[in-house]
């Protein structure tokens, strides 16, 4: 059994300067209680790997507004003007990665692969400084895996040994991020007895999960 942590104790595990994957798509499937606890803890200089930075003062946007983030690796920042303002001011570094490439780079890390070959970005500024391979006459960029110190993911349900399920579009980045980090912290909506989740309903097995948050009260 995995003891459930408060959001505050879980946030205390994450030091300044950590590389953190945060699940979700515009806040859907993001661990909101854990994000709030990180803001309250005053963490700084995070590298955040995520699909997006959500909106101002929502989801990951709260970390940006609190100036907790030094570097963002994401597929877009278009709905968060605060991220854009900090980038223009040189206060935050933003690395934009095509959404599919981002997901596959994370998956590559989780699967122990050396990288991903993709035609996306060939012949553009994205290709600068990257290795280009020609396969069957077609050019591909070698995009390297993305790993993190921590993966912070939201789940629909967890059981007492950490098996996780996800609801609907929260399947987005959470399952692959759970494969690609040294420490995985899951924020479930419900914690249920072992056996309550059908084996074929488990999307992230408990062996991958290091810590569970207490369920919301």
Image (spheres, grey):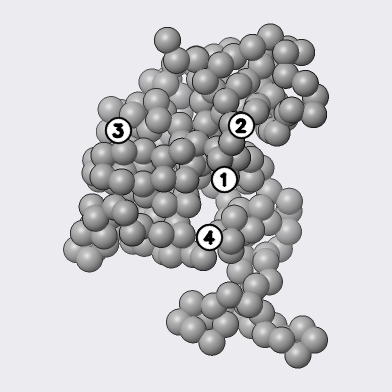
Pick the residue in front: 135 or 184: 135
| Residue 156 visible, this angle | yes
Q: Tell whether 82 sits left or right of 102.
A: left
Look at the numbered disc 2 and give the secondary structure of its residue: loop
- Measured as percent of width and height from the top left, residue 73 is found at 44, 57
Return the residue at label 1. 173
- Measured as percent of width and height from the top left, residue 174 is found at 58, 40
What residue lies at 65% left-to-right and 27% top-to-bottom? 164
Callout 1 crowding tier (Cα within 10 Å): few <14, some 14–19, many ≥20: many
Pick the residue in front: 105 or 193: 193
Label 2 or label 3, whichever comes before in sequence order = 3
How far apart, in angstroms, are the residues tagged by discs 2 and 4?
A: 20 Å
Label 1 or label 3, whichever comes before in sequence order = 3
Vertical comparison of 124 with 148: above or below: below
- Quarter of the picture containing the C terminus is top left
* Numbered mark located on residue 99 in the image: 4
Q: Tell whether 79 sits left or right of 191.
A: left
Callout 4 crowding tier (Cα within 10 Å): few <14, some 14–19, many ≥20: some
Label 2 or label 4, whichever comes before in sequence order = 4
> Which of the 4 image quadrants contains residue 41?
top left
How far apart, in angstroms, are the residues tagged by discs 2 and 3?
A: 25 Å
Pick the residue in front: 98 or 45: 98
Vertical comparison of 122 with 165: above or below: below
> Which of the 4 image quadrants contains residue 179?
top right
Look at the numbered disc 4 and give the secondary structure of its residue: helix
Q: Are marks 2 and 3 in contact (CB under 8 Å)?
A: no
Label 3 or label 4, whichever comes before in sequence order = 3
* Numbered mark located on residue 193 in the image: none
Return the residue at label 3. 39
How far apart, in angstroms, are the residues tagged by discs 1 and 3?
A: 22 Å
What residue lies at 59% left-to-right and 31% top-to-bottom? 167
């Amino acid at each position: 059994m995995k003891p459930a942590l408060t959001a505050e104790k879980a946030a205390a595990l994450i030091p300044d300067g950590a590389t953190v994957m945060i699940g979700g798509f515009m806040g859907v499937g993001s661990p909101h209680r854990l994000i709030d606890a990180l803001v309250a803890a005053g963490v700084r200089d995070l590298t955040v790997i995520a699909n997006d930075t959500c909106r101002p003062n929502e989801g990951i946007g709260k970390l940006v507004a609190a100036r907790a983030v030094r570097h963002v690796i994401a597929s877009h920042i278009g709905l968060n003007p605060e991220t854009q303002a900090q980038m223009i001011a040189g206060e935050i570094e933003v690395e934009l990665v095509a959404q599919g490439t981002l997901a596959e780079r994370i998956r590559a890390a989780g699967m122990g692969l050396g990288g991903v070959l993709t035609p996306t970005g060939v012949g553009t500024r994205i290709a600068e400084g990257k290795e280009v391979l020609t396969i069957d006459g077609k050019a591909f960029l070698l995009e390297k895996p993305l790993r993190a110190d921590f993966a912070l993911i939201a789940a629909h349900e967890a059981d007492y040994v950490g098996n996780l399920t996800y609801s609907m579009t929260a399947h987005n980045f959470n399952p692959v991020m759970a494969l690609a980090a040294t420490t995985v912290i899951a924020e479930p909506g419900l914690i249920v007895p072992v056996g309550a989740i059908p084996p074929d309903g488990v999307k992230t097995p408990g062996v991958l999960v290091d810590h569970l948050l207490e369920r919301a009260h």
